[in-house]
Structures are given as structure tokens and as C-alpha cells.
Image (tube, helix red, strand yellow):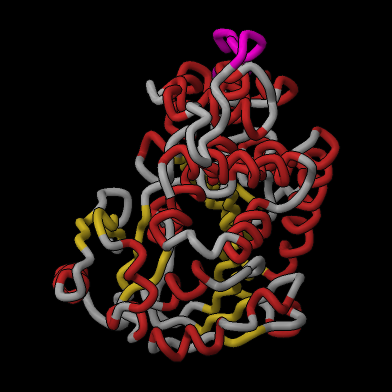
Amino acid sequence: MTPGARAAAAIAVLDRVLVGEAAEKALTNWGRASRIAGSGDRAAVRDLVDAALRQRRSAAALGGSDTGRGLVLGLLRAAGQEGLFSGEGHAPAPPVATEAGWVPQGAEALDLPDWLLPEMERSLAERLPPVAAAMRARAPVFLRVNLARGDVAGALAALATEGIEARPHALADTAIEVLTGARKVQTSRAYLKGLVELQDASSQAVVAALPLADGMRVLDHCAGGGGKTLAMAARAELRLWAHDAAPRRMADLPDRARRAGVKVMLAERPEATAPYDLVLVDAPCSGSGSWRRDPEGKWRLTPERLAELQGVQAGILDRVVPMVARGGWLAYATCSLLEVENGDQTAGFLARHPGWRLESERRFTPLDGGDGFYLALLRRD
């Protein structure tokens, strides 16, 4: 496919996404229907679609409309590649006068919904413009070195033998950033043997900040796929339980734990095995810190959904209080940049529950290299 034909394909996929179809489904359906598209073509179209969704508002302004054509035209204009709209072969038709576009302003220039701008300003203050700029780019690929299987130097060497170039990252002592060969990772021997796992550097930094020690009883209350569960298991000899409100999310966790060489117990009713020395609540949230990876999430979020999530977060925190032993720890984390989900939730918890104290808080943004994350370490008297 020519670059122009790839642009036309991205337009077709985006038109489906903009009427409600999930981007992954739209890309898959396009790929199946386009037998002439090779792996390079599919990757290029995916990159255009993802970039258009990350930069949806600014691209729509530059392209003159919030349509598949407008988004791709805006992206290519910004990159000095408007000439791909040539109408030749399978390329899109040349722009017309009504597609002149305009210079994006305010929330539009930051690629944010208007309603969310005040909360983002409150949460990030002067950091908002550079954080928004960072969120317009593709997220780096990070791996976690499994300390139960090896060390960073060994992992880097193992990956290099398979053509995967990586380097250590300062956010966590287990974090390495993949520079080239990212598509080879999940078929590499290092991955299949449990030496490395895909995990964002900020997520690893959250686990590295937990007060883990051998012999502790630990619950990962919102385990999901178990990334943080496995990261905790590699850091200390723990009695470790994982729980999730949707147990199917943990379906692969036993196999992943065996591959990683660690032991994890699944808890359908975590109250039954309480008390715990540490409970990690990586709560459901807006995902605003990881919108580089899930750009659709930015546009699906509504004020009503954000309010609902705040209620869920508070409910989970209240639920786990009786599960924490005296003198024990509650670690509250989100992959959010929003204070209504972060510091405000911590303050609300402390107001509702005397006998707890805040030991520390950490906030990560893409300016640190990884996703946006929040961590509060709370201790019971």
C-alpha cells in the first residue's frame, strides 16, 4: 500500500470508531477485509488511527471536521504531509475550501474534553501543557525484570540475543525500556521463561514503593490481570492473595505465576483470609494517566462516569478497612492524573476513618517517563 492508501484506510477505520465501534474491532475487521495489506501496512494504519484518537480535538481543528477524513487530514497537515491527499490511486481526494481548518485553542489545543479542563488544571497546574503534550505521543514500551528469575543485566543480555534492544529506566530498579524490537517481546525466550513481563515503569515504581518484607500477609484487592501481584511476589517472600470483583480477569494469573516462579493464592472472599499486613487497592479509575495507551478512554469518560468511579473507589477503601491488621498498611493507587480520584479520595478516607494516618504520597506523570499514577501509603494505628 502507498502512504496515501494507508491514509485512506485510516479514514475508513476512524469513521467506524467515531460512530461507536471499538478501535480494536474496527482495525481487526479492516485487516481481515484488506488482504493486500501486509504487516507493515497494518502497523502504519494502526499508528495513524491511534494518533488521531490521541490528538482528536487538535487534529479535527486542523483538518476542519471531527470525521475520519478531518482527523487524518489534520494529522498530516501538522506533519507537513498534506500532499498525501492527492486523489491518485487509492489516496484520499485533495482538500477543498471548506476543509481549511483553524488553529486549536484552549482544551482543544490540549486534546481534552472541555468539561474536564478545570479538573486537569486543578490537578496539574503549570504542568498541564507539557503533560498534555506528552499524552499526544505514543507510550514507551516497558518491561519489568522478574527478580525471582534474574537481574536487569541478565535480562538485557537475553533480550539482545533476540534482536530486542532495551535499557534500564530510572523510575524503578526493575524497569527497562524497549528501544527496538518491541513486537518480538511476547515471543522471546526471556518473556516465555518468565524473566520479563510487560509492565509500565510507573506501575513498577508503585510496587517498589510498597513496604514489603519477608513473611508479610498481603492482599492485592483489585488484581486485574495480576501485574502488580507478580511484581510484589518477586520482591519478598510473601503470603500473597489476589482478588478481583471480576474473577475472569485473573484467569491467566496462576499460569503466569508458575512461569514467573512465584506463588499466588486467589481469594474469592478476601475477608475469609484476613487480616493482612498490607492491602493494595489499585482502584478502578478514569485511566487518565494511561490515555496514551487507551486514547478512546479519554473520549468515553463523562462527568457522570467520573462521579460513579469516585463512589466505587470510596466504597472499596471502606470495605478493606476491617481486613488490615493493627499496625498494617493500606496502599491506595490509581492510574489517574485527577485529584478527585487521588488526593481527594485519600483525604476523604482519613476523614471517615480515625485511627489511620497518611505516611506518604507519590504522583507520577508522563513527564517522569511512564504513565500517570498516584500512590498513597496509609497506616493503621
Query: At 76% across and 70% down in the image, what residue appears?
Result: 245
| Quadrant in the picture for the C terminus | bottom right
Task: Examine the rendered structure and indicate whether residue 126 appears above or below residue 29.
Answer: above
The answer to whether residue 361 is visible is no
Q: Quadrant of residue 31?
A: bottom right
Depth check, front residue: 146 or 275? 146
Residue 46 position in % (x across, y down):
51, 50
Is residue 88 shown left or right of residue 357? left
Query: At 54% across and 46% down in the image, what residue appears?
Result: 290
Depth check, front residue: 166 or 40? 40
Depth check, front residue: 260 or 380? 260
Q: Is residue 103 magenta?
A: yes
Residue 20 position in % (x across, y down):
78, 46
Q: Quadrant of residue 192?
A: bottom left
Depth check, front residue: 103 or 284? 103
Query: At 55% across and 75% down in the image, what residue appears?
Result: 218
Query: At 61% across and 69% down in the image, what residue appears?
Result: 223
Q: Is residue 314 magenta?
A: no
Farthest residue, direction front:
89
Residue 205 position in % (x across, y down):
39, 54
- Start and end of the magenta stretch? 96-109
Residue 377 position in % (x across, y down):
53, 52
